[in-house]
Amino acid sequence: MVQEKFLDLLKRAKPLLGPISRDAVNLSWILDIHSSSLQTGIYTFQSLERAHLLPMVDGHLLGSLEDSFDMLSFYKTTKNALVHTFKLPVPPELPLRKANPVWINLESLSFNLKEFFRKIEDFGTAGFVEVEDRIKKERGYIFLYNGLVVSAKVGEEEGDIAFKRILRSLSENACLLNIYELNHITLEFLLSKPKLLSCFWDFEDAERFLKEISKRHAGSPALLVSVSLHEYGYRMYMDGEVIYEEGFDTEALFFEIYAIKSFAELNFLKPEDYISEHEKIKVLKSDEKSTIIYFCPACWSVVSGKDITCPNCGYDLTEFHNMPYEYKLLMGLEHPVVEMRMNVIHTVGVKDLKEALPQLEYMINKESNPMLLMAVVDALAKMSHPEALDLLRKLAHHTYPIIRSRAKYALEKKLTGGRRSPAL
């Protein structure tokens, strides 16, 4: 029953990759890319007889590859949706909601690491910084309370040990960096090491159980988390009553119930105690005399222009050179250097590459950099596919005014054949 519900949602979702014909698939390349970028999601191997599903969690495949298939697709999902649906032998993750991104222009800070944390403090952000190290293949989190660092986590490591590890990644390796806001009370709850009490796939059963727990432990909050295909939602209870809610979905796949004994005391970490004044968030060059930076397309670590295989992950770089140009463009949409990604987005638009639309839609949903989003608008404006028009309509309602304006202008030009509307 649960897997049927999961499959039903999957049928209505758009894949990040595919569907791609078996004849056009370089399966080892796709697995390398998704492994190096720590992807979490589900592969569907479709044939006339059946569909084979294969989960991937944080870049690790959990199951056996299908030998024969006609079409391949990959869908990004939340980790907990996979864990519960397929009863995977991995613990659920701390359900961090990523619906409220914060954007900081690193170029305006000259990529200065100390200035980055000063800017976060100026913003007074409550939430977390997600840092994905593409070389070490690990993901870490720095938790913020009113702009101040209160904790960090990398795998099983926590506190200042994890914080030092993440800072080392930021200053030494090519990383993807995102910042998200959380409500203060939710942040404090999640930092207090909540215990997962139970998981239900029916909302009414979950709420009934939670209200009983909440009343039994008067004065102690409990958190009901909706686990959907792509996002988490929160509903917090105290004495059986809802005291806070954000993004909660009563039609979600699963409902997790978390409880804590009491809120933990926050321990503030001072970034200036760990960072030198001129330390940079930087991309290392393999050859300091060269003006060109070469990246491995599998793990995005820096390589030499003379390398045949990546010294970090062992990826065969000659295989990349032999790939179709369109495949290279799809890979480039994940490039760690923003300017390169913008160039690829522009080229995707000029080439009218339909296969890139799922990744462009993912950027629209998750990206907070307005420069990248404007590049996406411009690319979609050049494309002829109906899906591109749908994405422009979505961007016309974006939270950033500059994106809304640009998307509306692009829509008007496409719908009027380039003629200026008399009403405007």
Image (spheres, grey):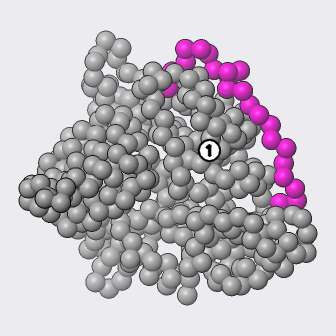
Q: Along the line of sight, which residue is nearer the eye, 67 or 131? A: 131
Q: Is residue 264 magenta?
A: yes
Q: Which residue is depicted at the point 91% across and 69% down?
A: 218
- Region in magenta: 260-282
Give residue 202's position: percent from left, percent from top.
64, 83
Direction from residue 387 to residue 54 in the image, left or right = right
Question: Where residue 379 sits in the image (x, y, percent)?
Answer: 22, 49
Residue on which disc 1 sits: 128
Quadrant of res 240: bottom right
| Residue drawn at 11 percent across, 61 percent down | 416
User: Which percent across, then down, holds residue 120?
Assistant: 59, 33
Q: Is residue 188 above or below residue 129?
A: below
Question: Label 1: how many residues lie within 10 Å, few (<14), some (14-19) or many (20+)?
Answer: many
Residue 401 on the magenta span = no
Q: So how many labels did they put on this image?
A: 1
Image quarter hosting the C terminus: bottom left
Q: Nearer the viewer, residue 296 or 218?
A: 218
Q: In which quadrant of the rendered image does the N terminus lie?
A: bottom right
Instruction: Give the camera-side residue of 352 and 102.
Output: 102
Please, what is the three-letter code of the amino acid marked with disc 1?
Phe
Q: Residue at x 53, y 63 (%)?
A: 231
Name the one closer to the observer, 195 or 271.
Answer: 271
**Which residue is drawn at the image coordinates 62% and 44% (left, top)?**
128
Q: Position of residue 87 (x, y in %)?
A: 61, 73
Please, is residue 322 above or below residue 301 in the view?
below
Main SS, magenta residues: loop
Against 264, residue 89 (above or below) is below
